[in-house]
Amino acid sequence: MINDRTKIKAILESDKAGYPVIVKGWVRTFRSNRFIAINDGSTQYNLQAVVDFEKLDPALLKRITTGAALSVQGDITSSPGAGQKVELQVKALEILGDCDPEKYPLQPKKHSLEFLREIAHLRFRTNTFGSVFRIRHALAFAIHQFFNERGFVYLHSPVITASDAEGAGEMFRVTTLDLNNIPKTENDQIDFKSDFFGRPTNLTVSGQLEAELGALALGDVYTFGPTFRAENSNTPRHLAEFWMIEPEMAFYDLDDNMNLAEEMLKYLINYLLKHHADDLDFLEKRLSDEEKQKPLQDRSAMPLIEKLKFCCEHSFERITYTEAIDILMQSPAYKKKKFQYPVSWGVDLQSEHERYLVEKHFKKPVILTGYPKDIKAFYMRQNEDGKTVAAMDILFPGIGEIIGGSQREERYEKLLQRMEELQVPAKEMYWYLDTRRFGSCPHAGYGLGFERMMMFVTGMSNIRDVIPFPRTPKNAEF
Ligand code: 4AD
Ligand code: MG
């Protein structure tokens, strides 16, 4: 035993009674001067601790307030009351940390998610965020387990890089230069030679390029780390700092890549259904309460758990980008000019288009392949038609794009030509091109947005509510 406390989860999961414990946690409610609901974060459920107020010092009783930290010692007994099988008969009680009820922002009542975002340092203490962050842990664990079971190597790609993996230029600069006194070259350019790394550097937007280097030796690898995008997207689905899982596999073609991605998503959902039913049950109820406030057409088609099961039981629809454009242009939404953004072959699909395909047309997850090369990154394998690339995006109900990936261009000449066309600095990226010069092989990979997956499995509708401390434009609080 590491320390003397017993976690509430273990107490509630066991049917046993008649044994002594020490429990430490925070008061959720205290009623009738007798019943303390204690939560210690190990589970959604509270333990009922019963105190004999006649025997307790009234000054101590007064300090048992919502939010206070307690240590209670006593016996677990079977509970006569409804709502719990066992309870704790308190023999000794110590207040570890007082919590002034006049000043404590969290009261035992419903708070809005917007309000809780403003007190993100305290929101872990609510039922909703307790469940969300236990699920977040479990999802991360299941990801490692999935890849470990398949012999993948977890590769740590650098957080600070000198390259723009996606070529989209949405990077946060990393520098130690004095911004009040920026050193200049003779041509009045910033003199990066005197910067920390002796060159311009930024926070990574993706670990993919480094993962490719690993895959071309280790076979199957994956990264799982924070990535950063300085895109000015203030939406419920974008963060400036998000976590991404990027598997990269040697000797995989696009079909293999899609098969792995689909198997992984189903595995992760099944893992949560099997091991975290309590938290999912709670989140399902939370979601249905929230949706009662919404107009009928904006509510989800299925309750959370049914949706998760549905997703595991059906194969994802696989269609080409070209087919998707046809479907969109035939759609009543298009004909009635309901889409805000234009649709025609060559455009990048917007969230409204993706959601139409998934939620209205196919009513299940969709994998889109064969995107126009002009809207995709330089590293994607060029198809024979000269117009499209071997890309794949996976679209999920309520989310839109959850995964983006492709087969990679393994042919040196074709890759070099594409880099030149898109002005990707081929000379600086000699290390990337080297893999195509020395033992190149077909390979593929994809990126799963961890928080997008979190949104899907928790039913939370704002990405700011599935990461402890969200980073978005004009917001880096905490
Ligand atoms: O489609 P993206 O940009 O693809 C890549 O970065 C590739 N290098 C992945 C690869 O092939 N290895 O991003 C991948 C996923 C998206 O599908 C989305 O789920 C998520 O990352 N994502 C974001 N999530 C939250 N906030 C943002 N700003 C995101 N941008 C992308
Ligand atoms: Mg993408």
Image (cartoon, rainbow, N blue to C red):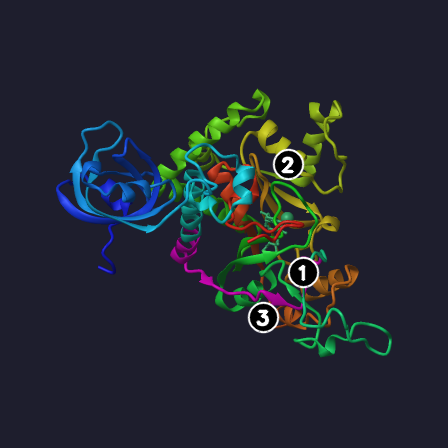
Upstream in sequence: badge 2 or badge 1: 1
| Residues rendered magenta in the picture | 142-167
Is residue 318 placed above or below 202 in the rendered structure? above
Question: Would residue 153 be counted in the magenta stretch?
Answer: yes
Label 1 secondary element: loop
State the residue position of label 1: 172
Q: Position of residue 148 (x, y in %)?
A: 40, 58
Q: In the image, is residue 93 above or below residue 425?
A: above
80 and 195: which one is in front? Answer: 80
How packed mark 2 is, by other alpha carbons closer than 10 Å (few <14, some 14-19, many 20 or more), is many
Amino acid bearing label 1: Phe
The span from disc 2 to disc 1 (Cα, nearest Å) is 28 Å
Q: Is residue 186 among the parts visible in the rendering? A: yes
Give the percent coordinates (x, y) of residue 379. 67, 58
- Badge 3: residue crowd in 10 Å (few <14, some 14–19, many ≥20): few
Disc 2 to disc 3: CB gap under 8 Å: no
User: Circle 3 is placed at which residue position?
Assistant: 439
- 63 magenta-colored: no
User: Helix, strand or loop at disc 2?
Assistant: helix
Residue 6: percent from left, percent from top: 24, 50
Q: Please name whichever residue, 95 or 8, is drawn nearer the observer in this view of the structure.
A: 95
Mark carried by residue 354: 2
